[in-house]
Image (tube, rainbow, N blue to C red):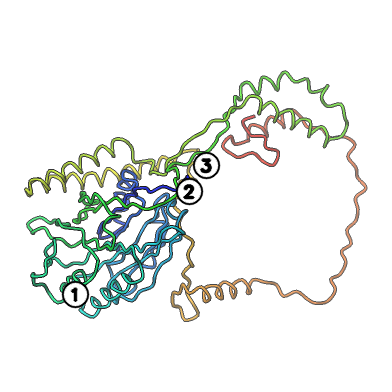
Amino acid sequence: MASANAHYFTHPIIYNNLASLLAKYDELCTLVSELKPSFVLISETWLTPLVTDPPISLDGYAVFRKDRHNNKGGGVCVYISDHICANFAVIPITVDTGNIDSIFLKITNTRLTFLLGCIYRPPTSIIEDDHSLFQCISEMTDVYQHLFIFGDFNMPDIKWPLNASQSCASSSQLLVDLLLNSHLSQLVTQPTRYRINQNPSTLDLIITSDDNSLAHLEYLDPVGKSDHSTLKANFQICTLSKERTVTYTRAVIDYRSVNKALTDVHWPSLFVTSSVADNWELFKTTVLDLVCKHSASISIKRSSTKPWIGKKILKMVRTKRALWRAFKRSGNQNDYKAHRNFSNNLSVIIREARIAYEKQLADSTDTKRFYRHIRNKLSGPVSTLQLRDDDDKITDDCATVANIFADTFSKTFTLETDSTLPSAIIPKPNVSLDSIEFPEDVICSKLKKLKLSKSPGPDAITASV
């Protein structure tokens, strides 16, 4: 019997060929903030191993990537939301597809296992690499019942929907034969790339063994200056329910009432003992009790969206999407130019909004808010650092990196002698303090230097009190 918290949810999944993830990162953040997909698949990331995860991280998502090591361009990556990762194990599957960029992830729990893949096949791909790719896909269909592959295959000569009588190039024929001789389906039937003065072409495909789990395929407008449509579908899988927002409790203190109550305390009658430790404990307990008495707890929901993406930008995103739909209906080049001009202007506005927000943080005296933003930017999966080995070559091999760290640390250690250390002779002072005085002006000076934005110390008394 299914768990009471287990439900079949419709999870949005989006795919796009970005042609530089870093260049269109702000626009991607805006799209993710609006659509809130559970899966984001990107081809042509143009990332290299020198680009770490934090600059491309999305709040609330884990990123899995496959970069090119030898040539520029290419690359693929997959973002998976935290609430999916909390319910499924995500296991990268290693396959050899030659110079074709590919990433395959086995996503599994006790109820469901499926394979999610993202591919970028360059137009210059050789027939041997194409054969390796489609052979791997064919073998995967024998292992995984649920298979979902998104990618840019660069095969514009194939006409969709597919029919057995059409003639194609030899590489394209490999894909046609795979689909005709298996239970796989290809779901994209409309053009996905648009350029001025060029015929639209269908380059981006969705290959699946379970087309019932993908529904409501939409051809959305491109991201930023990309010339590829964004593909969006609803993916039905079984997961545990989880809130999209993070709820936390915050104490609101009425400091005016606390200070008034502290003024009304008759401190001489409270400090009846001569012990400093006892008096301090009485003082701390009295203060904390009054703070608790004049405090109230409130629940705050915090979204993981980018704070600079406000209502104005989201409204412009909807306008951009409406311009794209108008072009899709008319096919008129003037409508396409209107969409591109608006999209380029929106990209500039989004980038300026992010820069203005970060400048406001940098100029603000609220250091907590500043460092919270920095931590979010630096968040990402933990990976092995890249270091230079003895041959001056960059390596990310775990054992090699560990040995480099060990050798470096060992050089800083002091070689201690094995002999007995001499005893230190420390004279004991005979001076004692008969009384301790704390002048009021000194205490006031110290209190004025306290920073209200700082967290309380071990005594739990805030600077505001």
As drawn, is 83 to the left or to the right of 442?
left
Expressed as whole percent of the image width and height from the top left, the position of residue 446 reads 68, 34
**Residue on which the image places disc 2:** 3
Amino acid type assigned to the residue bearing label 3 in the image: Lys
Which quadrant holds the C terminus? top right
Q: How far apart are the alpha carbons under marks 3 and 2?
A: 40 Å
Marks 3 and 2, the one that precedes in the sequence: 2
Residue 182 drawn above or below residue 227 = below
Q: Are marks 3 and 2 in contact (CB under 8 Å)?
A: no
Dot in front, 1 or 3? 1
For the point 26% across and 58% down, the residue is 211
Residue 118 drawn above or below residue 444 = below
For the point 23% across and 70% down, the residue is 182
Q: Secondary structure at mark 1?
A: helix
Number of other residues with Cα within 10 Å of mark 1, as a class: few under 14, some 14 to 19, many 20 or more = some
Expressed as whole percent of the image width and height from the top left, the position of residue 168 reads 11, 72
**Residue on which the image places disc 1:** 174
Number of other residues with Cα within 10 Å of mark 2, as a class: few under 14, some 14 to 19, many 20 or more = few
Number of other residues with Cα within 10 Å of mark 3, as a class: few under 14, some 14 to 19, many 20 or more = some
**Residue on which the image places disc 3:** 368
Marks 1 and 3, the one that precedes in the sequence: 1
Q: Are marks 1 and 3 in contact (CB under 8 Å)?
A: no
Residue 293 drawn above or below residue 34 = above
Q: How far apart are the alpha carbons under marks 1 and 3?
A: 57 Å
Amino acid type assigned to the residue bearing label 1 in the image: Leu
The residue most toward the right is: 430
